[in-house]
Amino acid sequence: MAYPKLAALSAGMLLAFSAQAAEVEVLHWWTSGGEAKAAGELKKTMEGKGHKWKDFAVAGGGGENAMTALKTRVVSGNPPAAAQIKGPAIQEWGAEGVLASIDDVAKKDKWDTLLPPVVANVMKYKGQYVAAPVNVHRVNWLWVNPTLLKKANAKVPGTIDELFVTMEALKKAGIQPLAYGGQPWQDSTVFESIALGVGGADFYQKAFVKLDQATIKSPTMLKALDTYKKLKPYTDKNAPGREWNLATAMVINGKAAMQFMGDWAKGEFLAAGKVPGKDFLCVAAPGTAKDFTFNIDSFVFFKQPNKDAVKGQQDLATALMSPSFQESFNLNKGSIPARTGLDMSKFDECGKKSSEDFKAAAAGNTLAPSWAHGMAMSSATQGAMFDVISQFWNDDKMTAQQAADKLATAAKTK
Ligand code: GAL
């Protein structure tokens, strides 16, 4: 029993103890191999500062389950100290009046000078920082098992046409071409990369960022939808419902040749001891070499009832943006640091490529927010669009025209 012991401590000692060591509860959905290692870095950092880490992990790639759990907690007046919330959803939570400002920490540590404005603006609500970014994930990647491609005498595809040639060669050689996880967020993750490859950056911006009705119903969208659906014969019958990391494991274990997925997949390859460039390849999704769909993970802070918890939050915010954390976390997570100007020498070739491509895409105006990962539109609109894409994927009778019309309606969801 802890009570008698605590009672023996003087009030002063208790105060000193509690002022240093807060219990910091953090919600996230990082439960796969690579994700859990990355989250472990955060736990280690906070424990190093003398805080008690309370893990609020809710399994489920893409975070839908985690967001449902979070809503329940906030509604019941008991929010965690911090939660992984991204993109425009930060503004939605801000409007609920439940977020805590961490502007003091941000000012002290000069976050405005350390973050690209495109990132900094998303982290602020009404001009004050309420969130800290931890990384930049690139979504438009294709993960390749080179041994399987070699067996089929197939080429790493650079264009959409080449993709189909490669998948056909793999199929003929009796190799499963695509590792696919049929879940709504994964369907849209794949569709997003195909749409970018088919339509290019301007089309992507008009369709998924501006939500322009004419673009959503355009022939280019129909082509993107048809191309996406043409992938289906190259997936296996167990794809429906499969978690993304199990699909990645198929590529790792030589059960399938390729997977469309963001670079959290790299975390899985690395956690399995695989070496980029040798055991696996990271290449831009076909037709998107010059583009970069970004997905920035960030932690948002909730108002807390006591001072110790606030101190814990401030320490967490400082830690999240520190160079050492941004390095160790991202080395495991598969992403690159959100903070600019960090030394990338410890990163592998995929990380270095991502960092260079991010800068080039920013300079060339081809940076695109990943709509499948909550970077581009409200969560309600995103949810409605997810439904349409998954319905289209699963219903073999639905035409691209019907899907485009439904997408146009979904885009109006407020
Ligand atoms: C993304 C998230 C990544 C990764 C992925 C799969 O939305 O930004 O950090 O965790 O889901 O769970």
Image: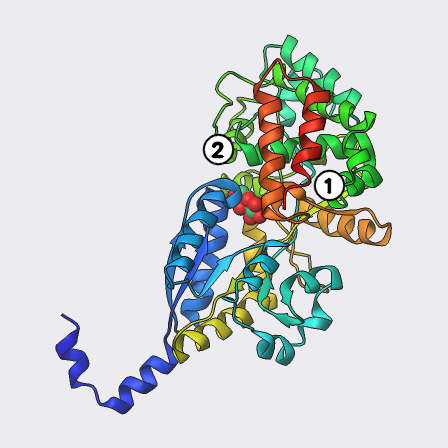
* Mark 1 in CB contact with mark 2 (< 8 angstroms): no
The three-letter code of the residue at mark 1 reads Phe
Distance (Cα) linking label 1 and label 2: 25 Å
**Which quadrant does the N terminus fall into?**
bottom left
Identify the residue position indicated by label 2 in the image: 243
The three-letter code of the residue at mark 2 reads Glu
Query: At 71% across and 72% down in the image, what residue appears?
Result: 112
The label number, if any, that marks residue 208 in the structure image: 1
Q: Where is residue 47, by image quadrant? A: bottom left
**Location of residue 90 in the rendering, given as x and y in whole percent from the top left corner:** 59, 58
Left or right of residue 211, residue 128 in this image: left
Q: Residues within 10 Å of mark 1 (few under 14, many from 20)?
A: many
**Location of residue 73 in the rendering, given as x and y in whole percent from the top left corner:** 39, 57
Vertical relation: 266 (above or below) 11: above
Q: Where is residue 382, by image quadrant? A: top right
**Location of residue 132 in the rendering, given as x and y in whole percent from the top left corner:** 59, 64
Front position in the image: 214 or 171: 214
Check disc 2 and report its element: helix, strand or loop. loop
Outermost residue on the right side: it is 364
Check disc 1 and report its element: helix, strand or loop. helix
Q: Earlier in the sequence, mark 1 or mark 2?
A: 1
**Location of residue 300 in the rendering, given as x and y in whole percent from the top left corner:** 53, 62
Left or right of residue 185, residue 8 in this image: left
